[in-house]
């Protein structure tokens, strides 16, 4: 199919495009047709899995905008999402936390007199009028970049989905063996259709590059650094990754976010571990491997050094939770912080759905006694500011390190990153000093 050619539509899809099912569906179908033209997809695929979208998501593109009045009328007439749809964390600046916002003391934008902890700002920023309509249509609002950990309803191997957040693509494609592209929107979830290209097509999911390592990848930090290095080395190719132990949930989170941040990897295979890779030969579809790349000790060290963007061993703040922490992460942090006292602010960020369990299990009390702040539903990239005087931040994931330096590039707002293990970050929170190193 040539670029910008018209995709083949079914009679039902043509009727929707012609406005036969209302303006909202018409705008959604026009947007999907445009995506087909851009991607070269010859048709749409019916989705039988789940959907994920950044919210509010009414601006599908510059040319396809759905107004809140149009959406409200659609919902009042019985309009609903076609597939189970989950709200991702909002990516927009000045997005305050769902929980803990009263204590974050962050300025809204550049106005020092207007705090994100102000109830008026928080109410406005939550855009509850939009969410009331989306919830009526069936949207399940998790407000998490790692909503796959709390949604309690996951797609099965081979099901076609439409997810959006970058690290969730790799979780869906590789970890679960379901199928998605980077296309989760109001349009795909509402119509239950997506352009049929890339990861929806079996042939595109086979591994093309074999990745090897000098060391056995087993610690959380190693999974994170290895993932970022693989992303840089592979770009858009599908790597077959060897040299690792079986990852736990936290390591999957770190690896999935890192490999999608270092490059544009949206699918990978771990032979003998992930669903579509019982063997290397199976993962490659029996095709010859294009290239074998060895991520040696020097490459791992280079990646670690790149992610450490610091000018001082002083630490002004520690930030943990991008992607959002899971319940075991919270438990382990509570144990490690018990009886300790933080010298600098420590932000611990998780999904809103885990705030209740964290409180009931006593984690929240332990965090508060240690001087740590539990926040949910946002991240430093989304809130758009840091506490006054903070310039040196310690983090424990590659995605955090990469995003934070990119979101605060101005000379006067530049943030410097000390990157390492979770234990090293906890030590930094207690001492105010960075003592991490690559081992």
Image (cartoon, rainbow, N blue to C red):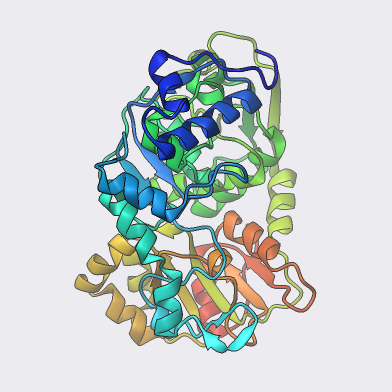
Front one among 112 and 80: 80
Vertical comparison of 227 with 10: above or below = below
The answer to which quarter of the image holds residue 376 is bottom left
Vertical comparison of 173 with 419: above or below = above
Quadrant of the image containing the C terminus = bottom right
Q: Which residue is drawn at 70% across and 41% down?
A: 232
228 horizontally vs 269: left or right: right
Work out which residue is located at the far bottom of the displayed protein and give it.
113
Front one among 194 and 224: 194
248 horizontally vs 93: left or right: left
Q: How many labels does the image show?
A: 0
Vertical comparison of 10 with 39: above or below = above
Q: Is any atom of residue 103 visible in this view?
A: yes
The answer to which quarter of the image holds residue 276 is top left
Find residue 258 and report its horizontal and vertical position in percent: 58, 47
160 horizontally vs 154: left or right: right
Q: Which residue is drawn at 45% across and 37% down?
A: 187
Quadrant of the image containing the N terminus = top right
Find residue 267 and report its horizontal and vertical position in percent: 53, 31
Find residue 43 and report its horizontal and vertical position in percent: 51, 17
Q: Is any atom of residue 246 visible in this view?
A: no
Q: Residue at x 67, y 82 (%)?
A: 314
Find residue 8 and report its horizontal and vertical position in percent: 52, 13
Front one among 114 and 162: 114
């Amino acid at each position: 199919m040539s670029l910008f050619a018209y995709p083949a539509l079914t009679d039902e899809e043509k009727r929707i495009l012609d406005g036969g099912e209302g303006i909202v569906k018409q705008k959604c179908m026009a947007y999907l047709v445009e995506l087909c033209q851009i991607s070269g997809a010859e048709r749409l695929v019916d989705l039988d899995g789940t959907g994920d979208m950044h919210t509010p998501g009414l601006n599908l593109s510059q040319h396809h905008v759905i107004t809140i009045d149009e959406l409200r009328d659609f919902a009042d007439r019985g309009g609903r999402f076609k597939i189970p749809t989950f709200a991702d964390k909002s990516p927009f600046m000045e997005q305050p936390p769902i929980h803990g916002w009263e204590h974050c003391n962050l300025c809204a934008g550049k106005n020092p007199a207007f705090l994100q902890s102000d109830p008026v700002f928080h109410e406005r920023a939550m855009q509850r009028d939009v969410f009331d309509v989306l919830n009526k249509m069936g949207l399940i609002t998790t407000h998490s970049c790692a909503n796959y950990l709390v949604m309690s309803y996951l797609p099965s191997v081979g099901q076609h989905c439409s997810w959006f957040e970058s690290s969730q693509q790799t979780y869906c494609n590789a970890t679960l063996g379901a199928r998605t592209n980077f296309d989760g929107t109001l349009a795909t979830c509402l119509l239950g259709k997506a352009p049929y290209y890339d990861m929806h097509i079996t042939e595109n999911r086979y591994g093309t590059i074999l990745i090897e390592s000098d060391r056995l990848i087993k610690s959380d930090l190693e999974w994170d650094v290895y993932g970022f290095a693989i992303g840089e080395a592979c770009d858009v190719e599908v790597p077959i990754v060897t040299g690792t132990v079986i990852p736990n949930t936290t390591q999957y989170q770190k690896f999935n976010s890192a490999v999608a941040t270092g490059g544009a990897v949206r699918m990978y295979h771990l032979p003998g571990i992930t669903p579509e890779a019982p063997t290397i030969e199976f993962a490659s579809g029996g095709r010859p491997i294009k290239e074998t790349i060895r991520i040696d000790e020097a490459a791992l060290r280079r990646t670690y050094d790149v992610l450490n963007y610091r000018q001082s061993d002083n630490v002004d703040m520690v930030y943990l939770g991008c992607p959002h922490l899971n319940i075991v992460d919270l438990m382990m942090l509570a144990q490690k912080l018990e009886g300790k006292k933080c010298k600098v602010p420590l932000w611990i960020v998780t999904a809103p759905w885990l705030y209740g369990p964290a409180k009931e299990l006593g984690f929240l009390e332990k965090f508060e006694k240690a001087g740590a702040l539990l926040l949910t539903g946002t991240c430093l990239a989304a809130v758009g500011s840091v506490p006054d005087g903070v310039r040196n931040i310690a983090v424990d994931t590659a995605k955090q390190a990469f995003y934070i330096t990119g979101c605060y590039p101005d000379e006067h707002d530049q943030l410097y990153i000390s990157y390492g293990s979770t234990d090293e970050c906890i030590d930094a929170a207690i001492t105010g000093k960075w003592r991490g190193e690559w081992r």
